[in-house]
Image (cartoon, helix red, strand yellow):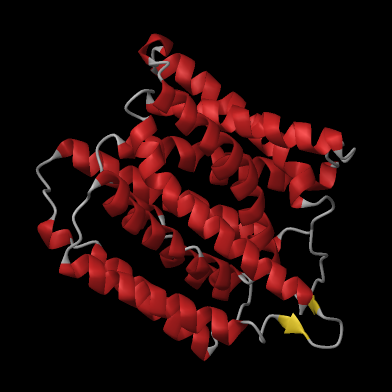
Amino acid sequence: MKNTTQAFLLLIAVVFIWGITWPIMKVGLAYTPPIWFSFLRMSIGAIGVFFLLLIYRKLSFPPRSDYSVIFSIAILQMAAPTALMHFALVYVDAGRASLLAYTHPLWVAPVAVLLLKESITPSIAWGLFLGLLGLMVLFNPFSFDWSNSSALIGNGMLILSAICWAAGILHVRSHRWTSTPLELAPWEMLIAGIILGVLALIREDMTDIVPALPFFATISFTGLIATAFCYWGAVVVSKRLPAMVSSIGFLGVPVIGLLSSIVILSERLTFSLALGLVCIVTGICILIIGERGAVLDQKTDRLIGPIGQKTRFD
C-alpha cells in the first residue's frame, strides 16, 4: 500500500506544480524567445539533477539497455513538447494552451488497449469519458477564429505536443527498465538541452533575451522545479501506473492551469470553462478512487506492469 500511496502523492504534486507553471511560462516568454526559454529551463534542470546525484553518489553512465527510453523521453517528453508549448504560448492564452497540450488521452487510451493489453475497467471508462468530455466542452471549435493563422499554428503545435507526450507515455510504460528514472533524468535533460540549444541558435536571436528580474525568476522556477523535479516525477508515475490512469491523472494539470491563469493573468472564467472543470475533476476522482485497489498486487504489495513485469518504486 505504501508504494501506491507514494505514486499517487507524486502524481498530485506534479499536477499542481505543472498547473501553476503555465501562467508562469506566459510571463517568462515576455522576456525570452520561446526556444531559448526551453533551452535555458532544460539546461538548469539538467544541472540541478546532475548536482543532486553527485551529492548522493548515484550519478552513473546509463546502460545500453536504457538508451532507447533515454532518447524517447529526451525527444518526445522534453525537447519537442517543451519547444512546441513555449512557441504556442506566444499566440495562445495560458489556460487554453494547458487544455490543448493535455489532450494526450485521446491518443494514449486506444493504443494502450491495443498494444499494451490494458483492460478498460468501469472506473477507467467513466474517468476517460468525463475527462475528455470536459476537454471537449472547454475547447469549443465553433467559437474559434479559423481565419487567424497565428492562432491556428499555436493550437496546432499544442496538439502536436500532446501527441508527442502520448507516444512517450506508452514507451515509458512498456520499457523494461534497468536504471531508475532519477538516474536517467540528467542524461535525458542533457540530450534535450543540446537539441534545444542547436534549434535556438538556428532559429532565434539570443540578444532578444531581456535580463530582468521576472526572467531570472521564471527560468529558475521552470528549470529546477517544473523541469528537474516534475519530469522525473512524471516518468515515475508513468512507469508505476497504467498508461490510461497516469494520462487521465495528468488532466488535472489543465485544471490547475486554468484556475491559476485566471488568478495570475486575469483570464476570464466562462460557463463552458466551469462546466469543463467539473467534468474533468469528477473524471479524475472516479479514476483515482477506483484504481487504487486495482493497480496493487495484494500478495507482494507491489505494482504490476501491463505485461506482468514487476518493477521497483524509486
Quarter of the C terminus within the rendering: bottom right
In the drawing, does residue 177 fall left or right of residue 25?
Answer: right
Q: How many marks?
A: 0
Residue 143 visible in image: yes
Q: Residue furthest top?
A: 207
Q: Position of residue 17 (x, y in %)?
A: 51, 52
- Quick check: 180 above or below 205? below
Q: Residue at x 39, y 52 (%)?
A: 101
Coordinates of residue 185 in the picture (x, y in percent): 71, 42
Rendered location of residue 168, percent (x, y)? 58, 53
Q: Quadrant of residue 290?
A: bottom right
Quadrant, the N terminus: bottom right
Instruction: Give the residue at the far right of this rendering.
Output: 57
The front one of 127 and 47 is 47
Residue at the (80%, 88%) spot, across then down: 298
- Decide if residue 305 is in sight here: no
Q: Which residue does the image show at 68% across and 38% down from the upper left?
A: 188
* Left or right of 137 in this view: 8: right
* x then y, percent, for residue 166: 51, 57
Outermost residue toward the bottom in this view: 122
